Image: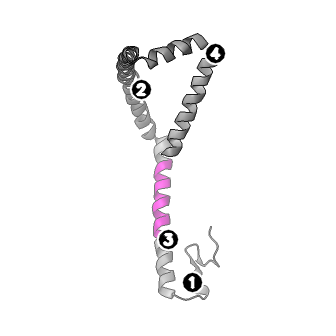
Amino acid sequence: MSDILESVARYAITQSMGLVIANPFKALGAGIALSNPYTRGIVFDIAIYFAKNQARDVRFVSTTLFNRVAIPAASASRAAAIRFATTPVTAIPAAAVGAAAVGAAISTGTVVAINRETNNSGPTSIWSPFGGMGFGTVV
């Protein structure tokens, strides 16, 4: 946490120095306004007002974009994805890959069972589902 505070403090000092160098009269005015308690209260009231308006604007814009752009795009994309996924060009290879995954899981289970049953360090402990003893090779 102290690293974050140190980074923020360093950034604030750097920005303050940049403001003083670029706009000395604006920096002098800000310094005078913040040094007087009465003017400091006015500055903070104005800053709070602008921050509330900014938050209201951000909420309005994000809600509008979400309702008018994201939701229609998502529903159109979902419909297109469902249409694409149910075409034979996609469904048949997906079914083949799924069946291969199930077959690989069954084969792995069989190999594990065979190796567990033999439970030795001889040649039968490297049983392969691809035609018997596979000498540790995987196809």
Q: Amino acid at mark 3?
A: Thr
Task: Left or right? Give the position of 98 relative to 11.
Answer: left
Classify mark 4: helix, strand or loop. Answer: helix
Q: Earlier in the sequence, mark 1 or mark 2?
A: 2
User: How far, Cα to Cα, is label 3 from label 1?
Assistant: 14 Å
Question: Label 4, on which residue?
Answer: 22
The answer to whether the residues at label 3 and label 4 have Cβ atoms under 8 Å apart is no
Q: CA distance from mark 4 to mark 1?
A: 77 Å
Proximity of marks 1 and 2: CB atoms separated by less than 8 Å: no
**Which picture quadrant has residue 62?**
top left
Residue occupying the point 46% across, 72% down = 109
Q: Position of residue 49 (x, y in %)?
A: 35, 16
Magenta residues, as a range? 93-107
Q: CA distance from mark 2 to mark 4?
A: 46 Å
CA separation, marks 3 and 4?
Answer: 70 Å
Residue 77, image quadrant? top left
Q: Picture quarter containing residue 34?
A: top left
Give the mark toward the camera: 4 or 1.
Answer: 4
Q: Is residue 61 magenta?
A: no
**Distance of mark 3 from mark 2, alpha carbons?**
42 Å
The amino acid at mark 2 is Ala
Q: Which residue, given by chain and number where applicable, does mark 1 sit on?
A: 125
Query: In the figure, 29 relative to 91: above or below?
Result: above
